[in-house]
Image (tube, helix red, strand yellow):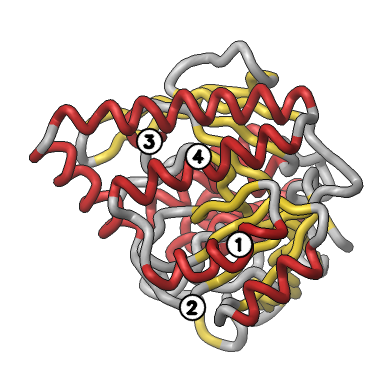
Amino acid sequence: MGDATMSMVASAPGKCILFGEHAVVYGQPAVAVAIEQRLTVAMTPAASWSVDGSPLSDKKHPHIVMLKDALMAENSPMSMHISGDIPNASGLGSSAALSAAVGAAMHHIATEHDSLDKDRLSALAHLAEAHAQNGRASPMDASTSVEGGVVILSNEREQRGDWLYTRRLETPEGERTWEVHSLSAAADDIYLVLGNTGVHAPTSHQVAMVAKALAAEPQRMQEIEAIGIVARRGIDALIRGDYEAVGHAMSENHLLLRNLGVSSPELEDLIQAAAPSSLGVKLTGAGGGGCMVALTRDPKTTGQAIELAGGRVLISRLGNPGVRIDE
């Protein structure tokens, strides 16, 4: 049983998908990077469990309740304060960052400073995501938030990157399996500029729309396979450090996503604005709204262009750290 007098602060990064959204649902590889923007949770002993002054409830805080039951069922209650600069419901992994940070802080308190077991933590964060999303969640966000850096998800062990672990989840449609890999990629002069449309488009709606389109025209599965081919090309370029080729693959990936019908006028406006000063540009996440991402050597010019087109801008380098204790 952990130290009931202990206060704890932990943080975890958001994520941005570089390649493979939507196609990953059909077994193709996808690549996510941990962004500089982080979510921080501060936990202090209290008379009862609370989050930002409100009582902890499964309806409002399903991720946190699941993690508390798994990690701190025997421990004294804590008051939690959440802060950070990852915009909510924008496809940048704010809920997974919350799960990773809360899980790390709880683990640290319950085990009295045992070193973090990232495999277990990302598995718990993935289960917390699934618990909050009616039993459906890929491990992409949770693994990226816990591991940091660059994460590859696939339905098979890829030759590229370092294999980390297998994830299984019993979903309403049956068991799903994923292979999770890490990749080291960092460059001093390369930036990701994220543009948020401010339009909220639920992931589940976008995924269902693609599923319906593929059911109506099964030959369109070729488009999904093409996204997989582009993603693997992008992974190879990341490994080589060839960021012109990474950018080219991103732009190609976007055209395929646009043809699938998951872009939006607001996203297209921001993408068009960012393209002239970028190596590559695409929507990131489920589409229909949310965010786009540009790979650029000139983040100031790219960011200004996105703002002029009506987007809210976040800038991040590549290769950011995963979850950590910030005592």
The residue that label 4 is drawn on is 252
- Going by the numbered disc 4, the residue's amino acid type is Glu
Query: Quick check: 313 left or right of 180?
Result: right
Q: Nearer the viewer, residue 165 or 225?
A: 225
4 or 2: mark nearer the eye: 4
The residue positioned 29% from the left and 46% from the top of the image is: 260
Instruction: Specify which label sits upstream in the sequence, 1 or 3.
Output: 3
Q: CA distance from mark 3 to mark 4?
A: 14 Å
Q: In the picture shown, does residue 119 fall above or below 104?
A: above
Quadrant, the C terminus:
bottom right
Q: Residue furthest front?
A: 276
Q: CA distance from mark 2 to mark 1?
A: 21 Å
- Identify the disc placed on residue 290: none
- Going by the numbered disc 2, the residue's amino acid type is Gly
Answer yes or no: is residue 122 visible: no
Answer yes or no: is residue 135 visible: yes
Q: In the picture shown, does residue 258 fall above or below 92?
A: above
The residue that label 1 is drawn on is 98
Asked whether the residues under the numbered discs 1 and 3 touch, taking CB atoms below 8 Å apart as contact, a structural biologist would say no
Instruction: Specify which label sits upstream in the sequence, 4 or 1.
Output: 1
Question: Circle 4 — which element?
Answer: helix
Q: CA distance from mark 1 to mark 3?
A: 26 Å
The residue that label 3 is drawn on is 23
Instruction: Specify which label sits upstream in the sequence, 2 or 1.
Output: 1
Asked whether the residues under the numbered discs 3 and 2 touch, taking CB atoms below 8 Å apart as contact, a structural biologist would say no
User: 10 Å neighbourhood of mark 3: few (<14), some, or many (≥20)?
Assistant: many
The residue that label 2 is drawn on is 198
Question: Circle 3 — which element?
Answer: helix
